[in-house]
Amino acid sequence: MAHVKLASLRVHDPSYRTLLRGDYGSPLPVDTLELLAARERLWPLPSGHTFSPAMPSAALVGLVTVLTVRVGLAQHVPPSFTSGSALAAESPSAAAPNTGSQGQSAGPRRSTLRLWVVGGVQVAGAAFVYGEAQRTWGYSRGRFHVKNDWTGDTLSQADEMSHLFFGYTLTRVYAGMWGWGGLQAKSARSVGAVESAVTMTLVEVMDAFNPVQGLGISDLVFDYAGVGAGLLSLSHPGDWGIRTSAKGVGLAQPFSQTKRQYDDWIFWATYRPPLRWGGGGGVKQPLSLGLGHSTRRAPDGLSAVREIHFGIGTTLPDVVRMFSPTLAERIGILDFYYLNLNLTATLH
């Protein structure tokens, strides 16, 4: 009886793989194998399909962004990708064919699972942020309207600086998550940038229907500028960054409700001089120079006074990188916070 090389068939149904492994005795005849292969080609099992019940409106914010982007992402996962980063997926060793059957079967499944983990985390995060934003800044139950956010919020562009920071940071965070999920670096950057832009746009859409807020055109401009800066920092890594820090007076809140809470945040543009300890091959020094912007309240308690900060500081990943570059990469998401000492100048 003639037999077929099983390696030439790509059958995904677990029950058929059990038959092909010979668990039921002798190898199957050619006609049976051909029928199984034809069945797989004509009626493939859906991959990654799941039933989603009705969800509250909070989750829909993330659902629009994440699940639409999720469609087709698995098609871009490198077949040889197992558990490394996106850079590992693009390395020569990863690009080489994997001759081990275990590596070929386990890698794509793990990558697909990671992509679903990333999508799930982002949906949950979007639901949480949506709920907190509605509770903190008011519910989006009014008519669409536009506001003058550049000079009409008495924050002297502190709000615009926060939008620049979040557009930049979300782009980098999203790209890092999709890279961990298995996308190649270029694809992860592109998806992260699009997702960040959509997220920040949805925030403004919510504000547009919020009676006490409104759509801020200047907010959108700074949102997209931050996304562009984040994408540039990923495609052309350098020694600069956009970061934030708190003044340390105990008022800073992730969802600031009052102007004084806004005033406690400083938003920084930082530059890390490319100097190394111990010569050209030594460890890169961790200190960065920073130019920061913030506001404080005037004596009347209402008007904003602009502050400019000149700082020197570092980030936790930059410090850890001196001792363990691997650990520094793992906690790279924390590089958004600038630990610093600064001098402050007031602009009237």
Image (cartoon, rainbow, N blue to C red):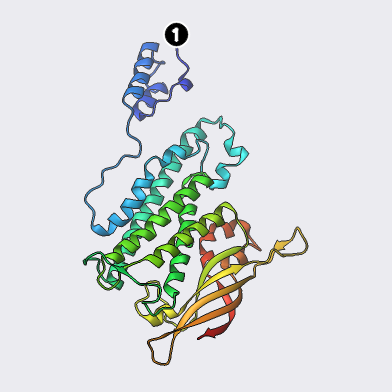
Q: Quadrant of the N terminus?
A: top left
Taking the spot 59% from the left edge, 73% from the top edge, the residue there is 290
- Whether residue 84 is visible, yes or no, is no
Q: Where is residue 268 in the image (x, y as percent from the top left)?
A: 54, 71
Q: Residue furthest top?
A: 1
- Whether residue 329 is visible, yes or no, is yes
Q: What residue type is labelled 1?
A: Ala
Q: Residues within 10 Å of mark 1 (few under 14, many from 20)?
A: few
The part of the image, by quadrant, that contains residue 251 is: bottom left
- 348 left or right of 65? right
Q: Where is residue 297 in the image (x, y as percent from the top left)?
A: 43, 86
Residue that mark 1 sits on: 2
- Regarding mark 1 in the picture, which secondary structure is present there? loop
Taking the spot 31% from the left edge, 39% from the top edge, the residue there is 49
Taking the spot 43% from the left edge, 89% from the top edge, the residue there is 298
The part of the image, by quadrant, that contains residue 123 is: bottom left
- How many numbered circles does the render carry? 1
- 159 left or right of 86? left
